[in-house]
Image: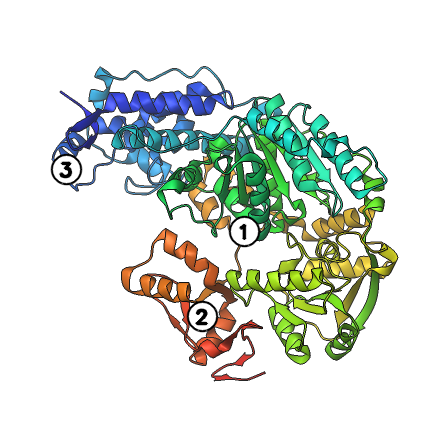
Amino acid sequence: MEYLAHIDGERKQSIKSHLYGTAKLAGDFAERFGKADWGYCCGMLHDIGKYSHAFQEKIKNNSDKKVDHSTAGAKECFEKGRMYGFMSYCIAGHHSGLPDHGSSSDAGNAPTLEGRKRKQIEDYSAFKSEIKIPEINTTPFDPLKEPDPDFSLSVFIRMLYSCLVDADFLDTENFMKNGETLREAGEDISVLLERLKGYVADWLLNEDTDTVNGRRTEILRHCFESGRRERGIFQLTVPTGGGKTIASLAFALQHAVENHMDRVIYVIPYTSIIEQNAEVFRRILGDQNVLENHYNVDYESSEELKPMQLASENWDKPVVVTTNVQFFESLFANKSSRCRKLHNISNSVIIFDEAQMLPTDYLKPCIAMMEELVGNFRSSIVLCTATQPALTSFFQRKIPVTELCPRVEEQFRFFERVTFKNVGIVSEDGLIEKLKQEDQALCIVNTKKRAQRIYQKMKGEGVFHLSTTMYPKHRRRILEKIRKLVKNGERCILISTSLVEAGVDLDFRAVYRQLAGVDSMIQAAGRCNREGKRDAKDSFAYIFQFEEKEYVPGQQLQIDVSKMLLSGGVDISSLRGIEKYFEALYHFRGESLDKKKIFEEFKKQRYNFAKAAREFKLIEENTLTVFVSREEEAEELLQQIKYQGYTKSSMRKAGQYCVQLYEGDIEKLQGAGMLRPISEDIEDFFELVDKEQYTEEMGLNLGIESGMAVLM
């Protein structure tokens, strides 16, 4: 009998061919972390359920009848016991997702691993005539060397799952498209290293450490040299203006070549920094070698970009630039679509840019995952920031952390651009009076409503407002206008929220920053005298507090710790001051550094992958989306989504015209008749009906009282 896995018209793929093809790929992927035998075995067993008579009837008759073909391989693993049992999670979930373990009382219809044990399925024994179960010759790791063997094993299962689902998808795709997949892996890392060296060749000739460029070159040269070190944990503590983007790339490419690693992955908190850095990398390394993977990038718009769209599924490019959310949520996900890329994180250099923004609510599981990548999956990590978080005490393995910036303290003194002044408590009117005396100043406050209110009181020639009440495309337009004014020396006062603190290239003569976390205040100060054209003694970052208290979601502890340090006379701009801030912050957070108790889902080899995936959400504020159709393209998109349905591509494009609001603000705007749902098919997605509530100068007006609009 001919046993078939896939049919495409007249073309057929046998189960045996598919299993061998998938096994070969999965084995190759797992070889990156030394477990080719595990990957190969998973690939050989994953589809043996297709040998059942019911499945063959279904595929040959093109029937819609559902036939479970995933449980069979898991049952074989159960029966072989010992280590094969770990693979049962991967095989059982290769379509539906890594399951929870469940309990011995689970019936056969339960979506758990225990349920699969008891599930009655079609006879698949015919597989024995064509397939032999491969032997496993290695162990996942030495449990005596692991600080938390259960967590380590759960990560190993995830990585194995990634190898399987990516291999399964690629082999199937190759058959269905008859080998014409349009995938392009990009150039070799060694080629990219030489390209970077050519780009910076002239810079490296500068040895004058009395100049800014000379200092940047010193840091860059040291990063190239340090790249020859063995894999491990590194930190690059570079002050603002020290050239950390190119320096970190120099270390990463040199390190990858030296240690035969496959790719460089940049993990960045803000899409604005991602877009900025990715553009720099593309300019140096070539478009085809750099993958941006985040919500705002669209790789579906043309046939030329098809390879990038495909690469975004499994990160098969030499340089990947992504978000904290995408990176960590994928590593704790359970669905095949999110997990395909995980095996390509192994054997990589991973740069955590703006490392102080690592998610505090999940800091312990995130750090444990980072250690796994270094300890068991042949990766190196680099914590890259001007405000280095105090993470050393959280690393449980005895892996030393190596600093990549030479003469760190001296570099910080050299690159000192501003003088901090704590002006204490002020009123809004008092703050406005101070701002009116300035010619070019940035004022950052903690809430969108406060930013709008101060702007309304102060607006006039040369005064601007910027916050997330404006959609992204609008913000970029305003920023360009501000940059031109500042560059030309014209009057420019910007009232903003924290969105301009990191990754936004602005250079004001003075910065006013409402009390916030120390890292936020230092980032804000980095927008003052950025080019170092003025003496630090004449460039001020003013720290202030308002008289009345206000609710700042997720930031109150950071504010309280900063207030404590300032009242104690600590120099918050010093390396020791930054360290003290993070030590105190993490101390007061205590158990909430694993807010959802993720570790508890992986105990005694009874792992709850599905539950952990549901719990691990880095962005938890209950925000809803408002679409603003003020521009022609936005209006066309709105009509397309309303009347033709939505696609991934249209929703990505729509993101450029969307504002995220908290539920309370949505309720007020709805109560005033200003919003309506766009479609029943899209949850929490609203259209701004009253276009007058959105202005060019201020964005979406949040000064709304329930049931009525109030003109501020």
First along the sequence among labels 2 and 1 = 1
Drawn side of residue 23 relative to residue 196, left or right: left
For the point 37% across and 56% down, the residue is 650
Rounded to the nearest angstrom, the CA distance separating label 2 from label 1 is 31 Å
Drawn side of residue 193 relative to residue 402, left or right: left
Rounded to the nearest angstrom, the CA distance separating label 1 from label 3 is 42 Å
Three-letter code, disc 1 = Leu
Rounded to the nearest angstrom, the CA distance separating label 3 from label 2 is 48 Å
Are dots 2 and 1 in contact, CB under 8 Å? no
From this view, report whether residue 229 is shown above or below residue 536.
Answer: above
Drawn side of residue 221 relative to residue 469, left or right: right
Determine which residue is flagged by label 3: 62
Does the rendering let one see residue 605? no
From this view, report whether residue 496 is shown above or below residue 2.
Answer: below
Give the residue furthest to the left: 61
Q: Which quarter of the figure is the N terminus placed in?
A: top left
Kindly state the secondary structure of the residue where label 3 is placed.
Answer: loop
Kindly state the secondary structure of the residue where label 2 is placed.
Answer: loop
Q: x, y percentage for residue 605?
A: 48, 32
Pointer 3 local density, CA inside 10 Å: few below 14, some 14–19, many at least 20: few
Q: x, y percentage for residue 693?
A: 49, 77
Determine which residue is flagged by label 1: 618
Drawn side of residue 486 relative to residue 131, left or right: right
First along the sequence among labels 1 and 3 = 3
Determine which residue is flagged by label 2: 630
> Which one is in front in this view, the residue at disc 2 or the one at disc 1?
2
Three-letter code, disc 3 = Asn
Three-letter code, disc 2 = Arg
Q: x, y percentage for residue 344?
A: 49, 31
